[in-house]
Amino acid sequence: MELGAAIGTGLLLGLSSGGQCFWSCASVLGPFMVVTSDEPQVAITRRSPRWTSVPASLKVLAWYNLGRLVAYLLTALIVSSIARSGALLPTPVLAGAQLLTAALLLYALLRPASKQRCWTPKRRSSSALVIGLLQGGMPCPPFITAIALALGAPGVASGVALFLALFVGTALFTLPLAFIEPLRRRLAEELLDALD
């Protein structure tokens, strides 16, 4: 697979599987995106500013996608290097990597809350980066397909280009997540109107 073919294949793979990627990302990142401000929540009124949270949401989304990009590129480098060397990772190593990923996600969910404020802007960005790193390496159908294609790529550059194009194609589908908080506010306003 030449470099141009790798880019085209990765982009088409990302665009064609973007819906699946959206729902996979939305289930993890959606609740995280509801409140992107460090300020305490205020009661929603009919005059609440709706769209002021979009820039903060886009910043969190950028950190999340940066984490995904790093995970994709690391996977591309590892898989393409393995393909070039002709060696395959033994099954216990792959199983161990998946168990480590699951353990890190479980730890992130179950760790005790600190006495500090939970979401300062710096911690929120770093948390989004970690979520992106962990979710970027999750074995979903397009990711596994990209691994299989990268194993057959003639060089490391083709494998990296394939994963980079896959990232671009799927990252487009994460952009609607920036509008979760404004939509939540609008639904709350409509609910207030319905109750009157």
Image: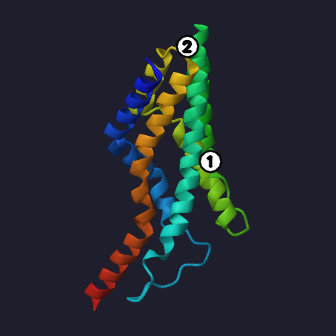
Look at the image and name its color scheme. rainbow
Q: Which mark is residue 83?
A: 2
Q: Position of residue 75 (x, y in %)?
A: 57, 29
Q: Could you say whether the residue bearing mark 1 is in a helix, strand or loop?
A: helix
Q: Outermost residue toward the front?
A: 4
Q: Is residue 19 left or right of residue 89?
A: left
**Up-down: is 182 above or below 92?**
below
**Viewer-side residue, 109 vs 133:** 133
Q: Could you say whether the residue bearing mark 2 is in a helix, strand or loop?
A: helix
Please, what is the three-letter code of the amino acid marked with disc 2? Ala
Q: Position of residue 41 (x, y in %)?
A: 54, 79
**Up-down: is 48 above or below 92?**
below
Query: What residue is drawn where x is 44% and y is 69%?
Result: 181
User: Quick one: quadrant of the N terminus?
Assistant: top left
Query: What residue is drawn where x is 62% and y is 33%?
Result: 100
Mark in the foreground, 1 or 2 = 2
Q: Position of residue 89 (x, y in %)?
A: 59, 14
Q: Which residue is mark 1?
A: 130
